[in-house]
Image: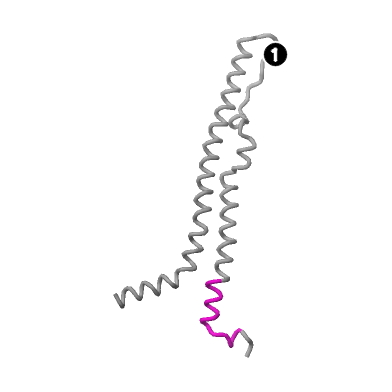
């Protein structure tokens, strides 16, 4: 009989519940953090904050035409402003999502660790109070 068959199932469950699963939940939480950053592309959006929106840029006219030059200049500035505005909104949403992910991880791990005590307390409350 090997050592795993000789161990008590309560000991095995306790080790799994309080040691193996919290470690697994921490790795899952880390994956969610990386997923949130990649899903909202926060680092990329921050790097390209003032890039034109959807790469829309107009070519400046050849020769001397001040009206067309300023028309193109205003259009390119507006495209960069629109790109920055949309990226700022997405960065803010991504940061809010990251805050929720960062707060949810410890809560989930804490609830997981406390589940047996909550169940025992609930049973005690139902049957003895």
Residue picked out by circle 1? 62
Q: Residue at x 53, y 39 (%)?
A: 90
Residue at the outermost right position: 63
Q: In the figure, is residue 60 to the left or right of 126?
A: right
Closer to the camera in the image, 68 or 81: 81
Residue 81 position within the rendered picture, expressed as x and y whole percent measured from the top left: 56, 27
What secondary structure characterizes most of the magenta part? helix
Residue at the outermost left position: 129
The magenta segment is: 4-18
Up/down of 53 relative to 22, above or below: above
User: Quadrant of residue 11 in the image?
Assistant: bottom right
Up/down of 97 relative to 62, above or below: below
Residue 17 position within the rendered picture, expressed as x and y whole percent measured from the top left: 52, 72
Q: Residue at x 56, y 55 (%)?
A: 32
Q: Quadrant of the C terminus?
A: bottom left
Closer to the camera in the image, 73 or 117: 117
């Amino acid at each position: 009989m090997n050592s795993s068959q000789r161990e008590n199932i309560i000991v095995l469950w306790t080790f799994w519940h309080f040691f193996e699963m919290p470690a697994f939940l921490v790795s899952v939480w880390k994956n969610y953090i990386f997923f949130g950053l990649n899903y909202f592309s926060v680092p990329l959006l921050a790097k390209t904050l003032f890039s034109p929106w959807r790469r829309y840029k107009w070519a400046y006219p050849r020769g001397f035409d001040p009206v067309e030059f300023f028309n193109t200049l205003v259009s390119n500035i507006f495209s960069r402003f629109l790109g920055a505005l949309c990226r700022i909104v997405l960065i803010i949403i991504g940061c809010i999502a990251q805050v929720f992910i960062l707060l949810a991880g410890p809560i989930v791990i804490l609830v997981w660790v406390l589940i047996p005590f909550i169940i025992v307390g609930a049973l005690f409350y139902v049957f003895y109070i």
